[in-house]
Image (cartoon, grey):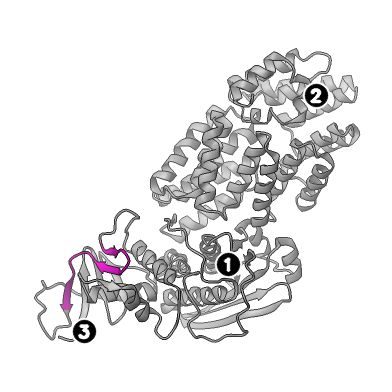
Amino acid sequence: MSLQDKTLYEFGPYRVDKQRRLLWRAGQSLAITAKAMEILLSLLERKGQVVTKDQLMQALWPDSYVEEGNLTQNVFLLRKVLGETARDHNYIVTVPGTGYRFGADVREIGNGNGDLGAPKITEPTAAANQAAIVWGRTAKRSMLWVSVAAGLLILVGAAYSGRQLLRPRPQPSGQRVVIAILPFVNLTGDNTQEYLSDGLTEEIIAQLGRLDPRQLGVTARTSVMRYKNGPGKLQQIAKDLSADYVLEGSVRREAQQVRVTAQLIQLKDETHVWSRQYDRELGSLLALQSTIAQEVADEIEHTLGNGSAQYAERHTSTPKTFEAYDLYLKGRFFWNKRTPQGFQQAIRCFEDVIARDPDYAAAYAGLADSYVLMSGYSLAPAGNFIPQAREAAQQALQRDESLAEAHASLALIAQDYDWDWPTAEREFQRAIQLDPNYATAHHWYAEHLALRGRFDESFVEIERARRLDPLSLIIATDYAAILYFARQYDRAVEQFLTVREMEPNFPRAHMLFYVYVQQGRLADAIADVESWARVENSAWVWALRAYGYRRSGQSAKTKQALTQLQRVYQRQELDPLPMVVAELNPGNQEKALAWLHEAYLKHSSGLTALKVDPVYDPLRNDPRFQEVMRGVGLAN
């Protein structure tokens, strides 16, 4: 019987249709790229035999020269589709130095013209066949971005295969370049179709972010999404994002037709390096997304790469439905507000995601991040939130040990609550190793280094974070805070004011108050806290008022502010740290030291700044302060 007569292969729970290039698992159609399917078919057709790398590369890229790493990445993608782990290769077995072979039993089922000796099995139902061609509304949403991810996983590995060029290939400069994936524009006229454009944008960012960071930096989503409703001029984008290239595009859908456009632009001269338009039937949307991903991969590799970049072979946290994914993005949006209300909304979003998709590791990491920061921003006792944060981070790692976000979460818990600085540093470094383009890991690690007084290293890390996420308010603000801790007051003021230009009421930017005090600009400091008081009535507002009034000799206002602060503490149990600052008195430090001891007993996360924050200078020589420093692990 010829190969053309062999229409179906079956192994384990999987079934492959060679002619239609379809893969099922337990009756459900799976998204698989064309290259991965070609590898699978090559191995199935030679079941049990070794297929050399040269044979596979000839089958995948006939008449084209590509690097062997491209094959490796496509094999990794195929293993991911088949559910294999790094340690469990039951189906795709590597033959060192030679190639691969298929390691499981394969049953071949004919098309009815002959008996292959295999047990009779039924064809997929009509409904299953239809599902493989035309998506329902829910399937479209849940699988769209997954298909994008699958296609983009071979981004670097895809070499230029003879398709149209718009310009000759430039010689690689050897310098690291930065690319910004601008939000794909939804031109459907229907806001409910945002998942088409947002999903495509997000997954391109996520997958490009897994490339070798020595060659390619990818601007974080929080920065590029600022251009969602107003793209702006390219030169302004280049200035704002410090990017060398942008990828932009649009999605239009009418009835059963979809049109996607995409173009890669070099910003220094606004040259359109590559552009393409796709018009397809909606039923072929999965194939369309893979095609777009392949085309983008070819051109970015052709233009920016030298074929030597490598994917980090690790798992990615993948939600099962668009609804879960959309809730996750909303959770991160609220989390980035850095307010108690924002964290509460983020927690609700992440919990909703977990209720819908209990295996989505990134949602647990988001929940951990929200709980661990909630204590410091809400001033609630750390014990109210840290156990939940730790549990959520551990749940994330149980589902995906390679998730950088979860390692960064554990690092922050070790630092802020456990005061276990070596463990925190190891976890931060692990997060960066897993995802070198994860801006938050660099950001938090920079802060960690600054809190330990290692400012030279800290400035290197915060610059990496700023480069990856140049419009992030919290990264920009904590850069100013590091400058303040390093006692570079003029630069700190300039940076805090830069944040204020972007968002006048960003809470953490009110650390500017402390810088003004250290500069002796008490009137400016008091004016700053009074402006804050017009939008917030928190314990920190009253604490800074008391501190500022005392420093400026306004005893009546100092007493009034202390009275109001004490009333706040009578209404609810709060972190004692604001009381430490409010009671800092050059002539009598007893009350401040008593509150400091109370903060130590309650594991206040703010104590991590004791070593470097100038506000504590009046207490440094007191043995009781030094004892707390030792307890927090900052004595050396």
Q: Residues within 10 Å of mark 1 (few under 14, many from 20)?
A: few
For mark 2, give the secondary structure. Answer: helix
Quadrant of res 299 = bottom right
Q: Earlier in the sequence, mark 3 or mark 1?
A: 3
Q: Position of residue 519 (x, y in %)?
A: 87, 34
What distance separates the C-alpha of mark 3 from that of mark 1? 48 Å
Q: Position of residue 315 (x, y in %)?
A: 42, 56
Q: With 452 as the anchor, is 587 left or right in this view? A: right
Q: Earlier in the sequence, mark 3 or mark 2?
A: 3
**Residue 3 - label:** 3
Q: Position of residue 406 (x, y in %)?
A: 49, 45
Q: Which residue is the site of mark 1?
A: 191
Q: Amino acid at mark 2?
A: Ala
Q: Amino acid at mark 1?
A: Asn
Give the number of marks.
Answer: 3
Q: Which residue is the site of mark 2?
A: 561
For mark 3, give the secondary structure. Answer: helix
For mark 1, give the secondary structure. Answer: helix
Judge depth for marks 3 and 1 and give the one in front. 3
What distance separates the C-alpha of mark 2 from that of mark 1? 48 Å
Q: Looking at the figure, which quarter contains the N terminus?
A: bottom left
What distance separates the C-alpha of mark 3 from that of mark 2? 85 Å
On whether residue 104 falls in the magenta region, the answer is yes
Q: Which residues are magenta?
A: 91-109
Q: Amino acid at mark 3?
A: Leu
Q: Are marks 3 and 2 in contact (CB under 8 Å)?
A: no
Q: Looking at the figure, which quarter contains the C terminus?
A: top right
Q: Residue at the spot x=42%, y=74% of the render?
A: 286
